[in-house]
Image (spheres, coloured by chain):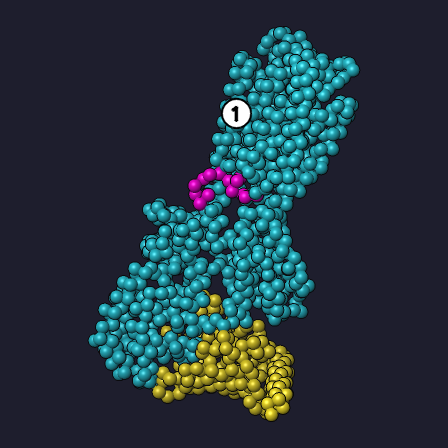
Amino acid sequence: MLTKINRWLVFALFLFVIVASFVGLRFVSFDNNIELMLPRDKDVLRSLRFFKESQFSNRVVISLGLKSSSSNIDDLIRATDSLAESLKSPLITEVINGIPQETNTVSEMMGFLRYAPQLLDKQTLAAAEARINPEGVKECLRNDYHKLLTPAGTFLAPFIRFDPLGIKFSLIDNIGKISSSFGYKVKIINGHFISADEKHALLILKTPVKITDGFGSRKLINYLQEKTTALPDYIGADIISGHMHTVSNEDVIKKDVWLISAIALPLFLLLYVFIYRNPQALYIYLLPVCSVIVATNILQLIFHKLSYFIIGMGALVAGVADDYGIHVYTAVRRSGKTALQHLAKPMFTSMLTTIAVFAAFFFSTIEGYHYLAVFSIVSIVFSFMVALFVLPHFLKFRDNTYSAGPRINAGFNFRPRQARLIIGCWLIIIFAALVLSLRVKLNSDINRLDGTSFKILQAEQQFEQVWGEGREKQAIFVVQASTENEALEKSEQIYHEAVSVLGRDNFLNLAMIWPSLKTRRENTSNWKVFWREDRKTKLEKLIREYGPQYNFSSDAFLPFFENLYETTTWEGKPESKFFQGLEERFVQKGRGIYQVLSFFPDNDSYVSQMAKISKRHPDTFLVSLNALPRQLSRSVSSDTISLLVIAWLLIIGITILSLRNLKLALLALMPEVTAVLVSLAALSLLGLSLNAPSIMAAIVVFGLTNSYGIFMVYNCRYEFKTNTPLSLFIAALTTIAGATVLLFARHPVLFSIGVTLFVGLISGYLVSQLVVPILYRLWFKNKCESC
Amino acid sequence: MKIKFLPLSVLFCFLILATNTMAEEDIHTVLMRLESKSAQINSMESNFVQTKKLAMFDKPLILKGKIFLKKPGQFAWHQREPMRYSLVIKNNTVRQWDEETGKVQEVSVNDNPYFSAALKQMTEWFSGSYTALIKDYAVTVLKQNPLVLEFVPRQNSSSSGLVKKVEVTFREDERYIEEIYIKEINGDATRLKFTETKLNADIKPDAWEAKPHAD
């Protein structure tokens, strides 16, 4: 026993830890990076990192729409311009509301086509060769003449003068195709991006804020919401961005944590006050609070960051921590401090099994689970130590004749007929639960865990309808290399392989209009050889001969012949805005690596065919928004199921080692086996599916119900006067109360945890109180009188 | 002498500025008037004669046919001479037919940059939204009764590299265009003249089909 001085030392140390932890809370930093909660799956991480670091993560789109039929497109454009003008903040680096007025599409196209000698391949030159004869030239001239007769003829004239054989038009077609990779269907009206129905305008914003940055996202969204509320009444604005999901999820979790705390804390207080009717019961109430604060500091010291999700989950787990306080309080009140000697062993075994549950989380590839494991283990060990070594010294009772215990115990002295009935019912329930649990489906759809508000999802759906026009989503094929040229070369090689599988129209690659430097040099060399003097002269002669038939003047195609070799010595890139825009879309640089992107329809068939190509090229990978959630879900599910198996094996192992008796261990495991089966049956009856969070909750149910089993087995075997049934009743009641509160959570993660915990804990507790004592009596034949 | 000259020149500058401001205001009033008149028009049907003087051609090219317009956004061009050709724009899609191939070809305006630019130019003058053009063009009144306006692309506007000027002649009642003359920077010129124009008349549904049309 501790001496008086040592006791004060323990108090002082305890107080120091608590005060230091409170002070330490000021220095806790939160990082709501969602990557923390994702498995270390190579493909998943690469895809997510790609999005995080790519052009896609730093874009916010605002869709402005006319709300009133009395307003028109001019009002919409004015509102778009005024909003664009008002967006001045370090959170926004660029605002794009359309094509700049000064962009001259025809001039830009003309400028680009001057690079044709570098861009046209051998096949195109072979096609040109087939046209340099009397019939071919006549046909080309007739086509040119017909084009000039159409209303678009005025604008086609400059193109035709530079291209009598029509060999460069394929490049313009390709520019049209490649531009569709931008994914939006827009009309350009007065230089603005306008929807087909002319009732919506588009603003694209570039931001340095990453979607995984919770705090930055909130600042950005608040800023944008403030600006869009200043729009006229007849204009509505939808903000479409990954940042909205980040903020919404965080809001829902925060609200849930507050709601749970607001309901749970007073509820627990009332439970303690009404059951114990002694102010000292408040110590039990404070114990989990202190353990959470200490664990938060330790987590900060080790990992230097925390997330709301971990704290939310951790606080729930820390609810387990109050059980030790309840056991100690109840035992001391019943039998004085000597009861602690009897309590130490079951408490220690229970702590070991609970730690084992969370230790299993270290086997997960999800980094966040490691945080959760540290958080839970620290709070459990802290609670255990404080409950056993500090709390008893705070407790002072005049007498130890607390009578609630016997009342609860009395219920366990069943007559043989009652015992048979209970065991019969239990077996029927187990059997029914087993049958029902086989029907539970594993749902690995991670989207179901997204707590994003309905309003945001609805806005996104509307955005798709207005701007997507039913277009298929695009998957991305990424080629990486240390230099831009190398990346472009590899990407071009992929392009040729891909079009042979997917077809020319289904794979959009920059090589369609801008091949690698190597190919451009080859093309230039071929062009020079092709247009050797005799071929050029032959074409000039044929055009002079047949041109007049179609009213063409003698110098109609002079620009073509005069500029035949103009760009053959250029090695730079076109300076046109449209080319720069395309290049920005298809080539990106980061961390010294160049990535060249290609786009293709995001459907299973194409994705699997491109995956085969990717396997053949080590520096490439695929990003499919359709496949990513499936990939992610599979990974999360397999990770969580492994945890379940490891946790179960650890619990079984520790229970057997602690009790050193297979029969006793089997008895101690009854509550958890029942709890898991009944939880699965409940999910099946409620039409719910088993998902990663409910598996996590099942692991927690294992730990808790196993403790009930261990305490009851110790109680039956050693007949300690520790009032175990009462302390288990209160411990279960407070935990079940916590789980009940979770049923009110709006976030699907917390809700599914709530259902599993609620059903699992009730069934586990009842089995520990009703079935374990009866089975003990049957198996160990009156070794325990009180059972 | 210099001291006296300075206030005079300043006054002169103010007068010039004031005159220019008045001219801008007048143009705006004229364009508003035209816009309000054209706002009452929902459809138009007319014969056209287009004369193209292109550097590529020895002789001017003369095209004849019929044009149809209906708000919002429907446009049909049925050409009779020198080659039969039809072009219909509806729901952001262009359908073309020509007698050479006898086939109908469908093009999305958005996916075709040169068609998109050409259509922008074509529909700009028929839309009736004249005040919006001030942003891209310097507008002057060349003649009254009938009203003739000159549109010169402003520097850096989308047409500046291509079009030198556009002259638009309105009908006597100013409800619609009678003639458009486009002079390009490279010297090419196009004159489009409308005759027998019917405003707000019922347009037969087959006018919106890209196919051979009878006279």
Chain letter belonging to callout 1? A
Would residue A241 be visible to someone looking at this image?
yes
Image position of A646 with respect to B177: above or below: above
Q: Colour of chain A?
A: cyan
Image quadrant where one finds the N terminus of chain A: top right
Magenta segment's dominant SS is: helix
Q: Residue placed at 74% from the left, 29% from the top?
A: A269
Q: Residue placed at 54% from the left, 36% from the top?
A: A303
The residue lying toward the viewer, choosing from A202 and A638, is: A202
Q: Which quarter of the picture shows residue A415?
A: top right
Q: Which quarter of the picture shows residue A587?
A: bottom left
Q: Position of residue A108 (x, y in %)?
A: 42, 71
Q: Position of residue A416 (x, y in %)?
A: 66, 11
Which residue ends up furthest to the left in the rendered image?
A534
Query: Where does the magenta region start and end?
Result: A32-46
Identify which amino acid the numbered label 1 is placed on: Trp
Image position of A386 with respect to A579: above or below: above
Q: Residue placed at 75% from the left, 23% from the top?
A: A280
Q: Position of residue B114 (x, y in %)?
A: 43, 72
Q: Position of residue A258 (x, y in %)?
A: 68, 39
Q: Residue placed at 41% from the left, 67% from the top?
A: A575
Would residue A600 be visible to someone looking at this image?
no
Classify mark 1: helix, strand or loop: helix
Asked if the magenta segment contains residue B95, the reply would be no
Q: Which residue is mark 1?
A: A648
The residue lying toward the viewer, choosing from B206 and A312, is: A312
